[in-house]
Amino acid sequence: MTDMNVQIAAQQLARMRGMVGLYHKQFFSDVRFTTVVVLVLGGFGFWGVEELFLVVPFIALMGACQTAFDASYLIFARQYAASLETYINDQLGDEVLVASRLESAYLFPLDVPKVVTLAAPPHFTWFGFMTAFYTLIGVGAFVVGLILGLPVASDAGDVWLVSYLGVLAGLTVVALAVGWWWFPAGNGERRLREILDSAF
């Protein structure tokens, strides 16, 4: 029965490794898409359609939430893969599989507080830097779009300006609060750990 269990675990591990690759690709696909949309909106805004500046902060916020969503699936797959590797190694009596340890050391660690995939030293990595880099670019696009768009919203009248700022601020605060609860506060990974620790 142990051989069958190892085979099933190995099949699940292959599935999780596929998910890791898929969500890495999806992350960069979403980054590219968001970047292109922001640049197109900004370009047309400077070309004379200044109302499009008002859309840029929403696109930047959506891009941030979408890429964090991609990362949440990446973390899910890595957590499951790490537990499967430990299980298979234990069954084989040898540390044959070390990919999860390599990922934790080289990409970003699991089960430590982090902003999506950005962990503080001593866990800081190039992967974490890229997360910070893309985040700061997104924040910059958000702020620039807001600064360029505010005169347009103001010209439309106080009701439009207050409505625009209220909706944007509300969505931003909710996204930051839920993101903090899920990532740095550790609630997402804690849910995975509870199930994986009892299963393996």
Image: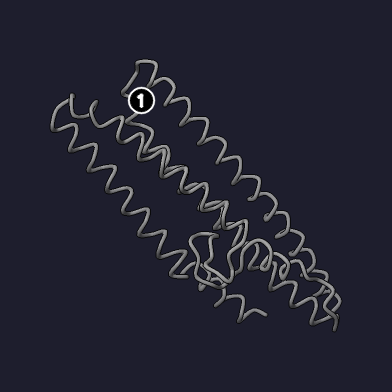
Say what secondary structure mark 1 lies in.
helix
Vertical placement of residue 198 versus 65, above or below: below
The answer to whether one can see residue 79 in this image is yes
Q: Which residue occupies 18% across, 24% down? A: 155
- 170 displayed left or right of 44: left
Q: Residue 146: x, y in percent?
A: 31, 36
Type of amino acid at the residue the image marks with label 1: Leu
Vertical placement of residue 94 versus 139, above or below: below
Q: Residue 187: x, y in percent?
A: 46, 70
The answer to whether one can see residue 1 in this image is no
Quadrant holding the N terminus: bottom right
Q: Which residue is mark 1?
A: 52
Q: Which residue occupies 33% across, 54% down? A: 174
Vertical placement of residue 7 versus 2, above or below: above
Q: Residue 103: x, y in percent?
A: 69, 64
Q: Residue 62: x, y in percent?
A: 43, 42
Quadrant holding the C terminus: bottom right
- 38 displayed left or right of 110: left
**In front: 55, or 10?**
55
